[in-house]
Image (cartoon, rainbow, N blue to C red):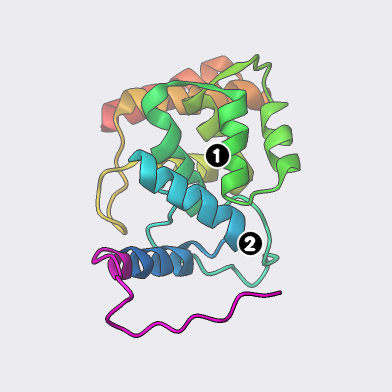
Amino acid sequence: MPLPETMFCAQQIKIPPELPDILKQFTKAAIRTQPHDIVQWAAAYFSALSKGEPLPVKERIEMPLAAEKTNAGLTPGLLKILHKQLSPQGMVKVAELKEKWEHLCLPEEQLKAILQLDSFGEEVEWMKVLALGCSVLGRSLLSSMKHACEILTKDPEGGAARVPFETFSFLYSYLASIDGEIPEEETEAFLHTIKEQA
């Protein structure tokens, strides 16, 4: 026999004072991030919130380009989230990278394709994964570097997107070596020119 339905009045229900703000921040984050699987993303959001980790939240909403599919996978905003979450470690376990990737509802095949571009083991150097992610976004070396600078810069959005020369040099050299079609002398000459201008 089912229990009788209990009626409560407003004075009997205690709402934690921080709940409205938590739900408001969560809603704003969900709108900015636009996750494809809201339940999976919400679990990652509240898990990160409870642990004091960087939240899986985009800084702003990204509107898809007319030529893109709505579920195109990796975007600059999502790569920036991964960078905030994983860059402090330097070396990242592939299992943790996969977990963070899944939390953002990104296609597993896309991560596999990125990891196959280099001979990574159980751990990966985060900056190399970032560079390969930028190459997926960029389609050309210079376009990839533009994405990398925009993700890594501390300049305000729309600004110069400056990064330290050492960082630029590392990413450019790495992507050029992965590309395989750019001679090492050409890479060194380009970087020398950039260093003189910096």
Say which residue appears at 40% left-offset and 82% top-offset. Answer: 8
Which mark is first along the chain, 2 or 1?
2
Left or right for 26, reference 162: right
The one of 3 and 28 positioned closer to us in this rendering: 3
Q: Which mark is residue 23?
A: none
Helix, strand or loop at label 2? It is: loop
In percent of width and height, residue 19 lies at: 32, 65
In percent of width and height, residue 5 lies at: 55, 81
Image quadrant assignment for residue 100:
top right
Say which residue appears at 53% left-offset and 25% top-offset. Answer: 128
Say which residue appears at 42% left-offset and 21% top-offset. Answer: 90
- To which residue does mark 2 refer? 36
The local crowd at label 2, few if under 14, some if 14 to 19, many if 20 or more residues have their Cα within 10 Å, is some
Is 13 magenta? The answer is yes
Q: What distance separates the C-alpha of mark 1 from that of mark 2?
A: 14 Å
Image quadrant assignment for residue 136:
top right
Kind of residue indicated by mark 2: His
Magenta-tinted stretch = 1-21
In percent of width and height, residue 168 lies at: 39, 29
Residue 187 shows up from this direction: yes
Q: How many marks?
A: 2
Question: Which residue is farthest front?
Answer: 1
